[in-house]
Image (cartoon, rainbow, N blue to C red):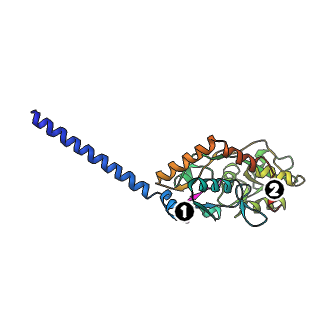
Amino acid sequence: MSLTRRALGLAFAAIAATGLAANAQTATQNLSSESVIEQIKEEGVIRIGLSVFVPWAMRDLNGELIGFEIDVAKALAEDMGVDVEFVPTAWDGIIPALVAGNFDVIISGMSITPQRNLTVNFTTPYAYSGLTILANTAMTEGFTLEDYNSPDVTFAARRGGTPSTVIQQLFPKAKLLQFDEDGAATQEVLNGNAHATMGAEPTPSTDARQYPDVVNVPFDQTFLATGEGFALRKGDIDALNFFDNWIRVRTASGWLKQRNDYWFKGNEWADQVSQ
């Protein structure tokens, strides 16, 4: 091969490499500009989809939202330099509402599962909790865990929530009543209309302390102790990167643990909500 042909070949290769680099940079810029992060920055507000359940998100005596998720969302908005708008949504419709664009991200104690991950992307976990059984003491006296898997046993749970799925997996023979709110499921157990429910700690233990003569947490066993993540629409790598790094920074500083301990391990906030 002559020097001239070799030089031409190298020149064409350099031009091609330059073109590929330019295309890659353009593609990256396009992905970034299409990210929900850019939309949030432009509009000056981040819209948070959530479902109301204690102590993740709940109404105080004045009707205002408080709870762990509310603290997380407000801190996230503050760090982004934008306002926050909460969009309370029924749990069984919250993922479709996200996909439809009704809000920017779900921050609502959503457990990371493979089934949900087929529809939405999840961040790295920002909290961890497990499920425990809350049982009507009189109706379940002497029950072993196996006794709950019976056609004569009735569970109550929030429709579309992780406890509902876990109950059906662990106790397929039992009946399952489903409601739109966790509180309604717990009330069924308190009223004696259901033998038990399941919920993420600390809710079952809190309920057992509040109604010690009616309900209890019968087993020192936690089920499905998976992490909870922000859920966002698929394909937005810029938003996923930002939220992941925000969680890492707030975890490293100890802030997430401090707020989690406040809402989940104490009850200083109890007088702010209706009992």
Task: Give left or right: position of 10 versus 88.
Answer: left
Residue 49 in the image, given as x and y percentages of width and height: 61, 61
Above or below, comparing residue 223 to residue 47 in the picture? above
Above or below, comparing residue 160 to residue 216 in the picture? below
Task: Give left or right: position of 219 versus 172.
Answer: right
Q: Quadrant of the N terminus?
A: top left
Distance from disc 1 to disc 2, alpha carbons, whole Å, reads 33 Å
Determine which residue is flagged by label 2.
Answer: 270
Residue 248 in the image, given as x and y percentages of width and height: 58, 43
Question: Marks 1 and 2: which is nearer the front?
Answer: 1
Specify whether residue 65 is painted magenta. Answer: no
Q: Quadrant of the C terminus?
A: bottom right
Label 2: how many Cα within 10 Å (few below 14, some 14–19, many 20+): few
Q: Which residues are magenta?
A: 96-109
Residue at 67% in and 51% down: 166
Determine which residue is flagged by label 1.
Answer: 44
Q: Nearer the viewer, residue 191 or 231?
A: 231
Residue 247 in the image, given as x and y percentages of width and height: 59, 46
The answer to whether residue 177 of the structure is visible from this angle is: no
